[in-house]
Image (cartoon, rainbow, N blue to C red):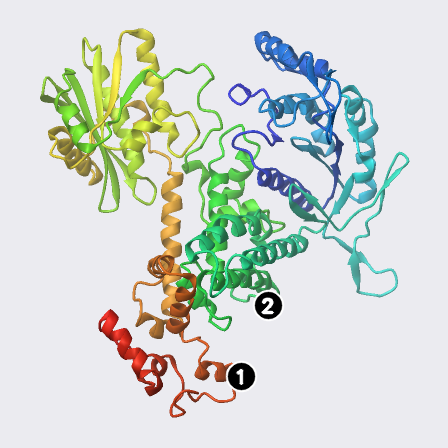
Amino acid sequence: MCEKLNILPANHFGARPGRTTTDSIHLLMKTVKDAWRKGKVASILFLDVKGAFPSVAIDRLLHNMRKRGIPRQYVAWMKRRLRRRKTSLLFDDYATARFIIENGLDQGDPFSGICYLIYNADMLKIPILTLGEWVLLFVDDAAVIVIGKDFFETHEKLRNIMNRPGGIFEWARLHNCEFGIEKFQLVDATRKRVAHAFVLNKKDPMPRRNLQLGPHVIKSKPAVKFLGVMVDNTLSWNAQCAAALAKGHDWMVQFGRLAKASKGVSSRYMRQLYLSIAIPRMLYAADIFLTPQRQIVQAPNARKSGRAIINKLASVQRRAAIMITGAMNSTPGDVLDVLANLLPFHLLVDQHRQRAALRLATRPEGHPLHLPVRNAARHLVQRHRTPLHELMHTYKMQPEKTEHITAARQSTKWVQHHKIVIPETKKRAVYEDEHDMTPIKVYTDGSGIDGQIGASAVLFRDGEVKSVLRYRLGSAKRHTVYEGECVGAIMGLKLILQERNVRTASICIDSQAAITATTLIKPAAGHYLLDAFHYVLDREVGTHEDFLLTIRWTPGHQGTIGNERADEEAKKAARGDTSEKRRLPAVLRETLPRSKSATKQAYNAKLKKSAKAIWTSSPHFERMNEYDSSAPSSKFCDMLAKLPRKHGSLITQMRTGHAPLAHHLHRITKADSPVCPACHQYDETVAHFLLHCPAHERARNTLLRQGGPGPRHP
């Protein structure tokens, strides 16, 4: 309800769908960089609240709920819920008598998050934007941002916003909130430099001064942690880069306990742990702090300092790949990436950042980053670019042409007005379709062909085709077949409502995902199409209450006449044979926005192509290609997953040539001679050890007799 009716302020982040920690940091970055572009400086005061949830005054909470227009029934229910709560305290084996809790919100209660947002939302009314004041809130984490010509002015503004009547300290007094002023942190952000006092033509960073706030002195720090990100006073992100690198190495230490060359967790699970745990933690907020470095790497005159952080983070992936495959430490990094089926690290960073850019581009109206993202995509400023500028232009995002994913799709009172039927088997589904006596049946389909996506709907009345609609969505790089299925459902409903005297009807779809999605209200890619479907259906049910619509799963390519006809019409639509606009539903008369899913899939395909090109240009490609021409792929990892850890490590070492044999050990200065210690005749290479060494002839013959002859490699 709060999201649907916009009860909460726009820049209140945390405990809300569609808003993340990095969103608030993007807004902070934009505010500071905008000030820098005008020749000003910014001071950021990070506040600390003592016991946020336990200190909530219930009467004030209920007052704030009424003030924000929440219906009295909800307020009364919350009052009853929070009244006369009882608890007891436990100390080892001693328990106190139960006593009544008058104030505070319960930790872990699903209602506590939204209640606290309502409770402290008035803090966002305190700053005066025309005076260069902003407040960002993420649940109980607050950042006060002020802009001025120098730090004398910004510090005076901070004292004013904290101490003035109606300021933050007065808000805290009225809301039973106690600040831990000794834990306040201050960052004075600027890159300005001032003339040196004694040396001509030398400039020093603008001096920072401590903030006097009543009896407390708050030191201006070079970097502080806010929402898990180290924000430094020049926004160069050196501290955050170091923190990300430390996180990566810490996780590698933990993973090292799970996987050794001869024993430990399977390679499949090690790869999964790396991608699902280490990478998200190491690249958390990479769309913010890795943007400048990544841009430097792409520049033709890239400096070593710009490549340093990417190379250091790539060393973490190298360690992970060694644990996944069981390879020796001397194995080349590109070979490790291919064997572990990992993207080269700089491409992995691009994948992470492109997804963040795409998420930002789909922010709906009402989100505080909606307009900043659109403006950043339109204009690439020359000075003090924000991460939004870098992301939108690096990945060629066009927010105005991309679908918007809203945080709340339906109201809390929304009721599903159709029935879905998904039989357990294809055979059963075909049987039920053949015995469905509904007079009106519409078969719909979405299809991709020749790089285009099309959709169709074919209406059968009493077993005869009566009408057909076709629609071409566009390129497969911008739309998905799933969207085509949803468009088919919309057109199918349009055909049904054009018929007279309709009380029951069926829409037959061959996609279970699309059918299930019609019952969900969770935000997802393409949900605007289903919202349009529900809007028309809800309006029809409101007019004719006895109308019953059934959406049925009818598997494709099972000989069903209706499905085959719909598939044929969808392919026609994909090739450009679209129905007249006047016959189409209103939502389809304009060009559909680009799909988030299709954009992500297209970029992932581009990354895989880039990874393949990097691998084929590697000096190690020719040798490794003899064993597996499909690399990079999951083929080698799938094979390792079926083997004991020790055997998988041996195969990896033999295939790469980096094995504990004399030839390789001599090359890395770990052995005095490359000669085979068994036969003392030839260098102990992998081929010599496996195929030619006379000392191992008996073992080799035994293996061939038991396993049969296999392919021989030189």
The type of residue carrying mark 2 is Lys
511 left or right of 135 in image: left
Q: Nearer the viewer, residue 666 or 234?
A: 666
Name the residue at 15% across, 37% down. 557
The location of residue 458, given as percent across then percent down, is 17, 26
Foreground of the two, 245 or 445? 245
Q: Position of residue 411 (x, y in %)?
A: 46, 18
User: Does residue 642 appear anywhere in the picture?
Assistant: yes
The type of residue carrying mark 1 is Thr
Which callout, 2 or 1, points at the residue further toward the start of the chain? 2
Other residues around mark 2 within 10 Å, as few (<14) / some (14–19) / many (≥20): few
Rendering quarter of residue 642: bottom left
Q: Nearer the viewer, residue 330 or 442?
A: 330
Q: Secondary structure at mark 2?
A: helix
Decide: is 701 above or below 386.
Answer: below
The spot of residue 440 in percent (x, y) is: 16, 17
Up-down relation of residue 162 to residue 679 (above or below): above
Determine the CA span between mark 2 and mark 1. Answer: 29 Å
User: Dot 1 lies on which element?
Assistant: loop
Provide residue 354's location: percent of width, then percent of height. Answer: 47, 48
**Labelled disc at residue 304:** 2
The residue under the point 82% across, 31% down is 160
Q: Which residue is mark 1?
A: 669
Task: Give the farthest residue toward the front.
Answer: 93
The mark found on residue 12 in the picture is none
Q: Nearer the viewer, residue 697 or 20?
A: 697
Residue at far right of view: 215
Q: Are marks 2 and 1 in contact (CB under 8 Å)?
A: no
